[in-house]
């Protein structure tokens, strides 16, 4: 059965990105539909899959990570506006039966992502 998962690593501190708000959208012909909201746990992961079962359908998606709020809560001095506030990651799901893992490696001034396992 296919599923979508994510996690966040704060590369500036070398620790999991805890308590980061995440929104998952499905892109449509007319815009974006909010599918789910979640918050990372103490390990920087979302408890359970963001999508699975019949909700896991092929298409274009976007994850939005509230990185600016996370760094402000940690007491990190950011410029206003923050260089990275909400980090969007747009990706496609082609095989609804596969596992898609979309991690985010974040610091106040840079990020990267990849398709993990």
Image (cartoon, helix red, strand yellow):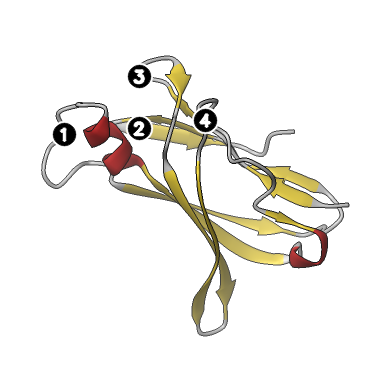
Q: Is residue 99 above or below residue 26?
A: above
Give the spatial CA distance, label 3 vs label 1. Answer: 13 Å
Kindly state the secondary structure of the residue where label 2 is placed. strand
Instruction: Indicate left or right for 1 with 59 as reference.
Output: right
Which mark sits nearer the N-terminus, 4 or 3? 3
Q: Which residue is mark 4?
A: 44
Marks 1/2 in contact by CB < 8 Å: the verdict is no
Please state which of residues 92 and 104 is positioned toward the viewer in this rendering: 104
Please state which of residues 17 and 86 is positioned toward the viewer in this rendering: 17
Q: Which residue is pictured at 82% across the width and 52% down the height?
A: 2
Crowding at label 1, few (<14), some or many (≥20) Cα neighbours within 10 Å? some
Q: Which residue is mark 1?
A: 78
What is the number of the mark on residue 58?
none
Give the spatial CA distance, label 4 vs label 2. Answer: 17 Å
Q: Is residue 44 above or below residue 56?
A: above
Q: Which residue is pictured at 65% across the width and 52% down the height?
A: 50
Q: Which residue is mark 2?
A: 110
Instruction: Indicate left or right for 115 with 3 as reference.
Output: left
Q: Which residue is pictured at 14% across the width and 28% down the height?
A: 77
Kindly state the secondary structure of the residue where label 4 is placed. loop
Residue 36 location (% of width, % of height): 56, 61
Please state which of residues 95 and 15 is positioned toward the viewer in this rendering: 15
Of badges 4 and 2, the one in the foreground is: 4
Of badges 1 and 2, the one in the foreground is: 1
Of badges 2 and 3, the one in the foreground is: 3
Q: Which residue is mark 3?
A: 12
Residue 1 location (% of width, % of height): 88, 52
Count of number-bearing discs: 4
């Amino acid at each position: 059965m296919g599923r979508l998962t994510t996690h966040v690593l704060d590369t500036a501190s070398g620790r999991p990105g805890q308590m980061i708000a995440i929104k998952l959208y499905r892109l449509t012909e007319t815009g974006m539909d909010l599918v789910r909201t979640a918050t990372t746990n103490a390990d920087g992961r979302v408890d359970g899959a963001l999508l699975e079962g019949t909700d896991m359908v092929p298409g274009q998606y976007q994850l939005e990570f509230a990185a600016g709020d996370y760094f402000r809560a940690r007491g990190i001095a950011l410029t206003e506006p923050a260089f990275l506030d909400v980090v969007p990651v747009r990706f496609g799901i082609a095989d609804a039966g596969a596992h898609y893992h979309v991690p985010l490696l974040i610091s106040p001034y840079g990020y990267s992502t990849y398709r993990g396992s």
